[in-house]
């Protein structure tokens, strides 16, 4: 199985329907791969979706 390193931009775009790259992120992340990231990416993503309860719940 492939491994994909996930950065903040695509992660936030996937979680936020209002993001202009939302459709792209959904399609791009629909892969059969193990997604990995790091604490810094998660911290930044939580900060960026903080105003959206849906986003923070989905991120958890």
Image (cartoon, rainbow, N blue to C red):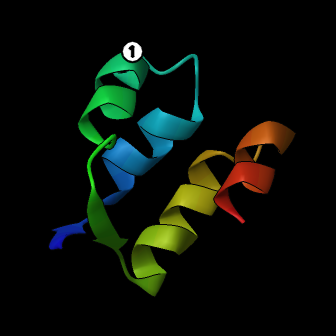
Compared to residue 30, the image places residue 6 above or below, namely: below
54 or 49: nearer the eye? 54
Q: Residue at x 39, y 15 (%)?
A: 20
Residue 57 at x, y percent in the picture: 80, 53
Residue found at the very far left of the displayed protein: 2
Q: Residue at x 48, y 44 (%)?
A: 12
Residue 33: tell me if it is visible: yes
Residue 15 quadrant? top right
Q: Tell me the quadrant of the picture where the C terminus can be found.
A: bottom right
Q: Residue at x 34, y 21 (%)?
A: 21
Compared to residue 2, the image places residue 28 above or below, namely: above
Residue 16 at x, y percent in the picture: 58, 30
Horizontal side of 58 relative to 7 (left or right) equals right
Q: Tell me the quadrant of the picture where the N terminus can be found.
A: bottom left
For mark 1, give the secondary structure. loop
Horizontal side of 44 relative to 4 (left or right) equals right
Residue found at the very far right of the displayed protein: 53
Residue found at the very far bottom of the displayed protein: 39
Q: Callout 1: 10 Å neighbours few (<14), some, many (20+)?
A: few
Compared to residue 23, the image places residue 25 above or below, namely: below
Compared to residue 37, the image places residue 24 above or below, namely: above
Residue 52: tell me if it is visible: no
Q: Residue at x 47, y 84 (%)?
A: 39
**Which residue matches tag 1?**
20
16 or 33: nearer the eye? 33
């Amino acid at each position: 199985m492939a491994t994909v390193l996930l950065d903040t931009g695509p992660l936030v775009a996937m979680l936020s329907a209002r993001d202009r790259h939302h459709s792209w992120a959904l399609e791009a992340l629909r892969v059969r791969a193990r997604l990995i990231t790091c604490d810094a990416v998660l911290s930044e993503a939580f900060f960026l979706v903080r105003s959206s309860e849906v986003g923070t719940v989905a991120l958890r």
